[in-house]
């Protein structure tokens, strides 16, 4: 990962919720993140272990993720400006600063191509903002638009200072097996989380949250320890290799490229038969569960799949 020239990834007029893996459904309701020692609860340094809490918080307020590195002069230049701008919003959004050298999995999850990269998370879904040392006025334009998009998607909360929460903010406990899954995810033990969700489904086959949670955790397991370049190269070299296409579809969904993943698998299904065709169909249905049955992209893809199959 190398520094890049400042360039917008998604301008204010085109910003939208293009996420996919809504990890917030795997988490218990979060409290505002702890103070990083910088004078407020609005700016914090976050690692891989603490990041899931910020994902959950994104259901209440927009979370701005700043991917930075010590080797990058642009990171050093951007940090105080972004800090100042975020503080000025008074808790309508929060800033999570991530050192990509210490936390490469977070950078990989966002498919970051350089540092600094700034991405928002709304309702567990990524919203690209910009790369590079962007001027303060331009940062404000991005964040103003982010707050508008958040409001359109029902994310209108605020985060106060430490000790300002009341008893009404105490979360209800999760069912035991869901709690076990949550604890396992917090510990980075995805196989244990998957097993907890399987047990929950065995007890209650209609448990939609457990089914979605299991699909999401299994996707994380499949991608764990693998590089995006490796996965994409294998898929490009072998367009008719079922496993290679399944892998890159997983990668696309994890990075928010939902339609790319759906189109890839539907095209593969259309030109194959037998076990490979069924494996691709089955994975596509799993990805539908992850994105959400009510998502318009899922509805459209189901129609295209039906035309291919029948």
Image (tube, rainbow, N blue to C red):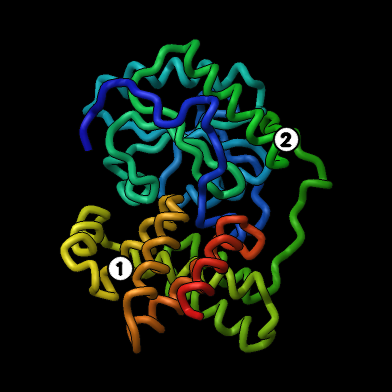
Vertical arrangement, residue 299 with respect to residue 143, above or below: below
Q: Quadrant of the N terminus?
A: top left
In the rendered view, does 115 fall on the left or right side of 10?
left
- Observer-nearest of 135 and 104: 135
**Dot 1 alpha-carbon crowd within 10 angstroms: few under 14, some 14 to 19, many 20 or more:** many
Q: Where is mark 2, residue-wise? A: 156
The earlier-in-sequence mark between 1 and 2 is 2
Vertical arrangement, residue 28 with respect to residue 165, above or below: below
Q: Where is mark 1, residue-wise? A: 245
Residue 271 location, x and y as percent? Answer: 33, 75
The structure residue drawn at horizontal position 58% and vertical position 84%, both measured from the top left corner, is 199
Vertical arrangement, residue 307 with respect to residue 60, above or below: below
Circle on res. 99: none
Q: Dividing the picture into quarters, in which one does residue 283 lie?
A: bottom left
Point out the residue furthest to the left here. Answer: 237
- Find numbered disc 1 in the image and state the secondary structure of the residue it sits on: helix
Q: Dividing the picture into quarters, in which one does residue 296 lie?
A: bottom right
Task: Give yes or no for contact between labels 1 and 2 (Cβ–Cβ under 8 Å).
Answer: no
Residue 46 location, x and y as percent? Answer: 45, 41
- Observer-nearest of 189 and 264: 264
Residue 92 location, x and y as percent? Answer: 66, 28
């Amino acid at each position: 990962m190398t520094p890049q020239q400042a360039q917008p990834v998604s301008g204010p007029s085109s910003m939208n919720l293009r996420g996919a893996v809504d990890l917030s459904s795997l988490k218990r309701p979060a409290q505002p993140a702890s103070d990083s020692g910088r004078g407020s609860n609005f700016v914090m340094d976050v690692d891989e272990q603490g990041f899931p809490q910020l994902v959950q918080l994104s259901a209440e307020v927009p979370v701005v993720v700043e991917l930075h590195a010590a080797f990058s002069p642009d990171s050093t230049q951007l940090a105080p400006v972004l800090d100042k701008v975020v503080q000025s919003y008074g808790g309508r959004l929060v800033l999570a600063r991530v050192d990509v050298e210490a936390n490469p999995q977070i950078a990989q999850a966002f498919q970051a191509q350089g540092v600094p990269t700034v991405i928002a998370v709304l309702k567990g879904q990524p919203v690209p903002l910009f790369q590079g040392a962007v001027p303060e006025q331009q940062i404000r334009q991005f964040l103003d638009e982010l707050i508008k998009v958040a409001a359109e998607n029902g994310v209108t909360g605020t985060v106060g200072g430490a000790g300002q929460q009341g008893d009404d903010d105490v979360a209800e406990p999760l069912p035991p097996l869901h709690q076990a899954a949550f604890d396992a995810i917090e510990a980075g033990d995805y196989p244990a989380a998957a097993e907890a969700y399987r047990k929950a489904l065995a007890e209650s086959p209609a448990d939609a949250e457990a089914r979605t949670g299991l699909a999401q955790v299994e996707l994380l397991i499949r991608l764990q320890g693998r590089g995006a370049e490796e996965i994409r190269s294998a898929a490009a070299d072998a367009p008719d290799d079922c496993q290679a296409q399944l892998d890159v579809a997983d990668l696309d969904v994890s990075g928010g490229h939902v339609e790319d993943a759906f189109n890839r698998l539907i095209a593969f299904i259309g030109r194959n038969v037998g076990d490979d065709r069924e494996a691709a169909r089955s994975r596509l249905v799993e990805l539908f569960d992850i994105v959400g049955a009510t998502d318009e992209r899922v509805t459209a893809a189901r129609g295209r799949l039906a035309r291919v199959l029948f």
